[in-house]
Image (cartoon, rainbow, N blue to C red):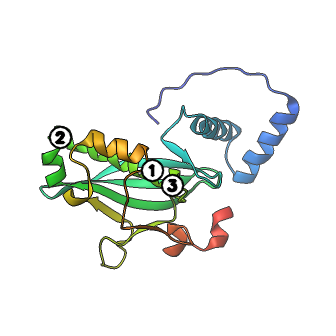
Amino acid sequence: MGEKTTNISIRIPDEYRKRLQLQADKKAVSFNAHILRVLEIHLMNSGFGPVSVTSASGRLFQIRTEPYLDNVDETTWAFFIDEPKYEKERAYYLIGIGRTILRDWQVKDKATVSKEVGLALLSYYNRKGMEIDRLAWNQYTTPDSDNRRVLQVAEVPETLEELFESLMTEQWVDKYVSQDELSQDIRRGRPESALYR
């Protein structure tokens, strides 16, 4: 709980307060915690909160990241795809960049560049109309590797700027990606009935 907080007083119509209290009770959280969650979701929707995307079907996803691997072969981040509406983690991807690319691009901060490329890829797939909780890659053939993508030198332009440009203009093609019928968490065993709990 190291976050700094400030006490404020707001006036809201009684009708809103009652509705918010009912929602908080239903979720078994405090009124304050529920208000903060509603505010966080609003900030994500309006572009002021954590990294988020809205899919073509109107679903809001929050993307959390954490470093996964940084060795001589690659620099990879873990990308957690949450659906705030249901407070569920819907997918977990490993997206990285091979060492030859990072060397050719003369990257000094491998970790930051790898994270930004991963976020740019997820935004690119989303703009292409793919639901980002349903992505699967066939780059690797081992079991449970459909959530892993590592860019290699033969598939990217000569510079990082050219890659970002090709993603923004949708000129880049990922031959390994597909969209499954089900979200990754359901493919991996979460019952669909748990989505709405």
Residue type at the position of mark 2: Val
Question: Image point 33% across, 57% down: which residue?
Answer: 95
Return the residue at label 3.
128
Q: Say which of 35 and 102 sits in front.
A: 102
* Residue 88, numbered circle: none
Callout 3: 10 Å neighbours few (<14), some, many (20+)?
Answer: few
Res 155 → quadrant: bottom left
The reply to whether residue 112 is visible in this rendering is no
Residue type at the position of mark 3: Lys
Labelled pair 3, 1 in contact (Cβ < 8 Å) = yes
Question: Image point 57% across, 38% down: which residue?
Answer: 44
Where is residue 106? Give x, y as percent: 14, 40
Q: Which is nearer the N-term, disc 3 or disc 2?
A: 2
Where is residue 122? Give x, y as percent: 44, 52
Callout 1: 10 Å neighbours few (<14), some, many (20+)?
Answer: many
Q: CA distance from mark 2 to mark 1?
A: 22 Å
Q: Which is nearer the N-term, disc 2 or disc 1?
A: 2
Return the residue at label 1.
124
Q: Say which of 48 and 155 sits in front.
A: 155
Question: Image point 12% across, 47% down: which residue?
Answer: 103
- Frontmost of labels 3 and 2 is 3
Mark 1 element type? helix
Residue type at the position of mark 1: Tyr
How many marks are shown on the rendered structure? 3
Callout 2: 10 Å neighbours few (<14), some, many (20+)?
Answer: some
- Frontmost of labels 2 and 1 is 1
Q: CA distance from mark 3 to mark 2?
A: 28 Å
* Residue 107, numbered circle: 2
